[in-house]
């Protein structure tokens, strides 16, 4: 009987084997052919946690940390663990109300799920942190998560140090350092320029996560992890005491100070005013503070030391003299018979001195800053018979000026440096339709006309004069800790640029003699410091500004340059105070005080009242106040137009101000807006948009 | 019939016992891999009996004791009590209705206190197998008669009906495996072919658009008539047959399948079937949608299970990640890991090579059982052996196909490997009864 139907046993075997073959075929498909499952599995179960190293510290020349790290705390919440907490007390500690609390918990649940921690409040202020640290045990589910934050212990050098902010898409595209959304990156100053050194190397830890996305442990016993390497520390040439003094002296002024060590190009101090407290851009309030800074028309975020463009005025004169001497158009004995004005061209150029003989030779001309002498020198340079054409003379002159580092970017180690302007023939060809001569631009000889330079460039030019022909590119960073010196971004700063060493030393001597006389008995006698030979030059730069569409002559810029000691110069300083008046009045004392502080380590007690006087004087130009008013009121009007909410607008709506505004807008910018102002109700805030009152306060400062 | 050597080891097929032992060990190891958490003390885990792997070990020990008892039993006991056992099995199944407790959506489990629970549907396969073997081996039974065939089918399918009533569709399907036994005993092959064609038709109905399929069927019918045109000319009946088949097919495709899916199956079952063939299921009405939601229990849905299971197995690659190294199976990505989806642990941990070896062990077991079956003198033993092979085969195929996404999610365990006392005991008893019967293969049992 068993033989009966026996062939069917083979069929059954075939069925068994057949289905197993199908299963194995599917396994081949899943496990060998298709690679997506491995990737999916890793996405499922692996979490690459980025470990952020601490950023490098920036020290000054005396080893004091100007930019350091500290730890601040975020309050995080794991919603699933929040149970039985005293919500009222919690909200009281944090200063929020209970509905806000509920919203944030719901928000956290939505964003990260109930089982993972989400930031509830970031960067707790110290007082709130202290309260929470004591009471955190009362709030299960809440944790204090530490987070490294940049701190500026001296509240100084905001523009130089820069700040960190979250990366944007541009940065991520431009640099391929592997940034991710939410990473912090240096956004200005040294923080930006030395980003690669400061940021260190980010580490990656591979964590295993479970089905609820909780981290459960290290993957493969950390064997795939990359440890984080801390950022490298920067040692700078800066002297934080000088920096602080400079910033103090610039309070309530618009201007800047640059102090360079001529022998190395190391920048000792660089201040720009108005400035801001760099610590404002680190804490929890940074967004608000940043908004305020951006809306301030006096542009506190602007580093005027490298971005401010000024006519150098008389501070150019030593350079003009050097060019003339090297060209052979003047000699140290050359003089000019000045009677209070330069009259050789159609427009007279005024001179401050009338007494004959004040420009009897070059040295006296520099000491008395004779305009006529230098106008003449400039014309002689351009009309040099050697070239037989002012066109070629100007080109040659421009070569000299550029060699002095004027009118082009020098290449300092902080970003966004401005180039300035030394005009060439094309600029005048265009303006004067090819018919011009040396008279057309004669005031360039006294640092006016189209010449535009930055304070950094003037300071650097002084370094060249002090060094008798060479310079190092001005830079902040002396060395980078643990960095192989052979392969360093700093190499280009160690390169000596011998741009004007072909000018003999005795020629420089003539000019420095004159500059020393400026301090001894000339315009900058206020800068005299006993025992130190100072070479200096003051400048009073005429300037114009477009105000409400009109080219308005403003009060002169007060400019001052100096270097000292005369033999073996240790510091060269440039000071520019916008719209302050004579160079000797404001800029010179500031430069002199910095010089004294740096060279003698202290300031004579007799000069302390001078510091008080300088600090206490408000030289903010008036147009800024008007400008601020216009901007704020225009913004408020725009807001009112868009939303119908006139609460911000209200405070600008007195009849007199309204007429000012109408006057402004009718003529210039926005015809649509001015008609809008005319149609505005005089004083009728709309109540239906009360919610927006809060942010109106914060924005329209 | 007179056994001169009373040693129980006489005539025992040791290869089956070894295969059984290997599979049970793999089972304990896989459950260990799936549920062990880093830092737990392994020894304490085994002693405490609180962990799943220690419990599985306990069940294995109980299974050993049961096996020894079975080996000590006289073979005739099984033939004698087969019908009684069937009655007991049905009684247990019926008992579920008043005493069931709802676990994971099924109503097929009886609980005794907290720790112990019984799933009669599992156990019942043994009794059905015995009863069917008993019926087929009766001298009076002439399996070529339709009546006998119907009775045999009824014996096999009656528990299936009860299982369906308990919403335990997976177990119900298992009873269909007895058709393999019947096929071996002379059930016309046509029935199997028709059954197979029917399932192909159902799947095609789901996959292919209605009218297209109707056209394809018509085309096949036309080609059939064209090929068989000579026979058709000679015999009108052939034409009528073909047209009749075509008519039935279109009817099934047009009306029966939609009707069954809408009115007989639960919405979640329909969704599982759709998931398995890779189509989105759009519930017909809100009620169905809500039922699916309820079935999901809010957190996991079957599609998720299958996806995670495929990811786990697929990420094992060729050599696997190694025991306890699987990231997917160890961190609860695959639900029901230790029971129905235990194959994932093997697939992820040991990769393609390991899975293939594992499957080969099963295949060797099955083929060995077939060999054992064919050497029986007694019809009862042969039928029973085929029954064992079929039931185990069905479990393996459906379970593994489910984890690799070839079959809908049907909750049936992997024999000897999945966590679960009833399942392990059932299969052990089933196998050892076969070993006992095989040991007495010289006897003719009725």
Image (spheres, coloured by chain):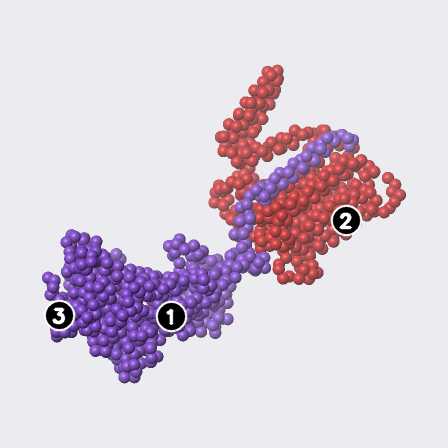
Chain colours: A purple, B red
Q: CA distance from mark 1 to mark 3?
A: 45 Å
On whether disc 3 and disc 2 are found on a single subunit, the reply is no
Q: Residue furthest top?
A: B234
* Residue for badge 1: A237
* Residue for badge 3: A337
The residue tagged with tag 2: helix, strand or loop? helix
Q: CA distance from mark 3 to mark 2?
A: 130 Å
At a point 77% along the width and 49% down the height, the residue shown is B67
Label disc, if present, on residue B67 of the rendered structure: 2
* Image quarter of residue A360: bottom left
On the rendered structure, is A107 left or right of B299? left
Image coordinates for residue A588, horizontal then vertical, percent: 24, 74
Mark yes or no: residue A701 visible: no
At a point 58% along the width and 33% down the height, the residue shown is B200
Eyeballing the image, is A693 above or below A517? Answer: above
Image coordinates for residue A234, horizontal then vertical, percent: 42, 67
On whether disc 1 and disc 3 are found on a single subunit, the reply is yes
């Amino acid at each position: 009987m068993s033989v009966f139907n026996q062939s069917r046993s083979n069929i059954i075997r075939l069925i068994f084997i057949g289905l197993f073959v199908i299963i194995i075929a599917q396994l081949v498909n899943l496990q060998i052919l298709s690679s997506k499952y491995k990737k999916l599995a890793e996405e499922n179960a692996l979490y690459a946690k980025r470990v952020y190293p601490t950023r490098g510290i920036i020290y000054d020349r005396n080893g004091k940390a100007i930019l350091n790290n500290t730890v601040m705390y975020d309050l995080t919440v794991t919603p699933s663990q929040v149970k039985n907490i005293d919500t009222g007390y919690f909200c009281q500690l944090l200063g929020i109300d209970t509905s806000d609390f509920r919203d944030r918990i719901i928000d956290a649940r939505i964003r990260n799920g109930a089982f993972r921690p989400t930031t509830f409040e970031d960067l707790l202020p110290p007082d709130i942190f202290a309260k929470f640290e004591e009471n955190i045990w009362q709030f299960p589910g809440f944790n204090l998560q530490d987070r490294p934050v940049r701190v500026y212990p001296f509240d100084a050098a905001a523009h130089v140090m820069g700040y960190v902010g979250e990366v944007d898409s541009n940065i991520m595209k431009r640099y391929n350092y592997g940034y991710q959304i939410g990473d912090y990156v240096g956004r200005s100053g040294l923080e930006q320029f030395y980003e690669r050194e400061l940021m260190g190397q980010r580490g990656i830890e591979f964590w295993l996560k479970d089905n609820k996305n909780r981290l459960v442990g290290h993957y493969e016993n950390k064997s795939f992890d990359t440890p984080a390497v801390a950022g490298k520390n920067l040692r700078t040439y800066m002297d934080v005491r000088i920096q602080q003094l400079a910033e103090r002296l610039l309070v309530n002024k618009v201007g800047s100070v640059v102090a360079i060590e001529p022998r190395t190009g190391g920048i000792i101090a660089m201040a720009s005013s108005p400035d801001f407290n760099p610590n404002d851009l680190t804490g929890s309030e940074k967004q608000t503070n940043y908004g305020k800074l951006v809306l301030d028309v006096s542009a506190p975020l602007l580093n005027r030391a490298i971005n401010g463009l000024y006519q150098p005025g008389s501070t150019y004169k030593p350079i003009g003299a050097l060019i003339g001497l090297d060209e052979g158009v003047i000699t140290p004995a050359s003089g000019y018979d000045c009677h209070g004005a330069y009259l050789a061209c159609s427009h007279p150029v005024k001179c401050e001195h009338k007494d004959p003989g004040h420009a009897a030779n070059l040295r006296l001309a520099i000491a008395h800053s004779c305009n006529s002498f230098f106008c003449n020198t400039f014309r002689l340079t351009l009309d040099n018979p050697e070239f037989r054409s002012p066109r070629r003379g100007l080109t040659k002159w421009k070569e000299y000026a550029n060699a002095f580092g004027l009118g082009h970017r020098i290449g300092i180690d902080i970003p966004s440096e401005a180039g300035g302007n030394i005009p060439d023939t094309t600029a005048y060809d265009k303006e004067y339709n090819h018919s011009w001569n040396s008279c057309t631009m004669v005031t360039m000889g006294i640092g006016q006309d189209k010449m535009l330079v930055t304070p950094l460039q003037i300071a650097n030019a002084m370094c060249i004069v002090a060094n008798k022909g060479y310079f190092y590119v001005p830079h902040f960073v002396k060395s980078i800790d643990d960095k192989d010196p052979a392969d360093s971004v700093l190499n280009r700063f160690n390169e000596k640029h011998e741009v004007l060493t072909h000018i003999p030393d005795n020629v420089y001597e003539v000019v420095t003699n004159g500059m020393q006389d400026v301090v001894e008995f000339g315009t900058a006698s206020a800068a005299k410091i006993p025992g130190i030979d100072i070479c200096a030059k003051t400048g009073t730069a005429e300037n114009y500004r477009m105000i409400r569409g009109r080219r308005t002559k403003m009060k002169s810029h007060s400019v001052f340059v100096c270097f000292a000691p005369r033999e073996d110069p240790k510091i060269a300083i440039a000071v520019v105070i916008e719209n302050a008046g004579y160079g000797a009045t404001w800029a010179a004392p500031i430069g002199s005080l910095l010089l004294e502080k740096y060279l003698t380590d202290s300031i004579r007690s007799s000069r302390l009242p001078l510091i008080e006087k300088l600090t206490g004087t408000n030289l903010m130009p008036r147009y800024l106040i008007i400008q601020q008013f216009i901007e704020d009121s225009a913004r408020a009007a725009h807001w009112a137009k868009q939303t119908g909410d006139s609460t911000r607008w209200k405070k600008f709506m007195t009849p007199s101000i309204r007429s000012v505004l109408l006057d402004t807008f009718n003529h210039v910018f926005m015809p649509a807006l001015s008609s809008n102002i005319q149609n505005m109700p005089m004083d009728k805030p709309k109540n239906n948009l009360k919610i927006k009152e809060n942010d109106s306060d914060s924005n329209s400062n | 019939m007179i056994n001169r050597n009373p040693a129980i080891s006489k005539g025992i097929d040791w290869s089956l016992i070894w295969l059984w032992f290997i599979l049970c060990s793999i089972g304990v190891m896989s459950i260990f891999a799936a549920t062990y958490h880093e830092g737990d003390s392994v020894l304490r885990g085994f002693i405490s009996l609180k962990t799943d792997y220690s419990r599985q070990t306990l069940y294995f020990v109980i299974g050993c004791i049961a096996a020894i008892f079975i080996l000590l039993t006289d073979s005739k006991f099984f033939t004698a009590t087969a019908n009684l056992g069937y009655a007991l099995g049905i009684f247990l199944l019926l008992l579920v209705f008043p005493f069931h407790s709802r676990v994971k959506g099924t109503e097929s489990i009886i609980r005794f206190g907290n720790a112990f629970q019984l799933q009669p549907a599992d156990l019942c396969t043994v009794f059905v197998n015995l009863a069917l073997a008993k019926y087929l081996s009766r001298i009076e039974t002439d399996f070529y008669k339709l009546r006998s065939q119907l009775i045999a089918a009824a014996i096999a399918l009656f528990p299936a009906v009860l299982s369906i009533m308990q919403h335990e569709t997976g177990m119900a399907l298992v009873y269909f495996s007895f058709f393999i036994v019947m096929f071996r005993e002379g059930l016309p092959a046509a029935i199997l072919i028709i059954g197979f064609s029917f399932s192909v038709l159902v799947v095609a109905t789901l996959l292919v658009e209605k009218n297209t399929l109707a056209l394809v069927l018509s085309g096949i019918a036309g080609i059939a008539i064209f090929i068989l045109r000579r026979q058709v000319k000679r015999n009108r009946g052939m034409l009528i047959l073909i047209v009749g088949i075509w008519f039935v097919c279109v009817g099934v495709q047009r009306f029966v399948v939609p009707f069954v899916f809408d009115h007989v199956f639960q919405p979640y079952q329909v969704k599982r079937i759709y998931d398995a063939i890779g189509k989105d299921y759009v519930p017909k009405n809100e009620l169905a949608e809500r039922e699916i939601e309820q079935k999901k229990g809010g957190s996991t849905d079957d599609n998720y299970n299958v996806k995670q299971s495929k990811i786990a197995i697929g990420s094992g690659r060729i050599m696997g990640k190694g025991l306890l190294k699987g990231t997917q199976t160890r961190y609860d990505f695959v639900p029901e890991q230790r029971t129905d989806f235990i194959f994932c642990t093997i697939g992820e941990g040991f990769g393609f090579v390991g899975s293939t070896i594992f499957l080969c062990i099963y295949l060797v077991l099955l083929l060995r059982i077939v060999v054992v079956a064919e050497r029986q003198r007694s019809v009862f033993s042969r039928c029973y052996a085929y029954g064992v092979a079929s039931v185990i085969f069905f479990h393996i195929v459906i379970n593994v196909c489910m984890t690799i996404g070839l079959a809908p999610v049907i909750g049936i365990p992997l024999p000897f490997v999945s966590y679960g006392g009833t399942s392990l005991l059932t299969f052990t008893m089933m196998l050892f009864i076969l070993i006992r019967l095989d040991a007495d293969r010289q006897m003719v049992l009725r």
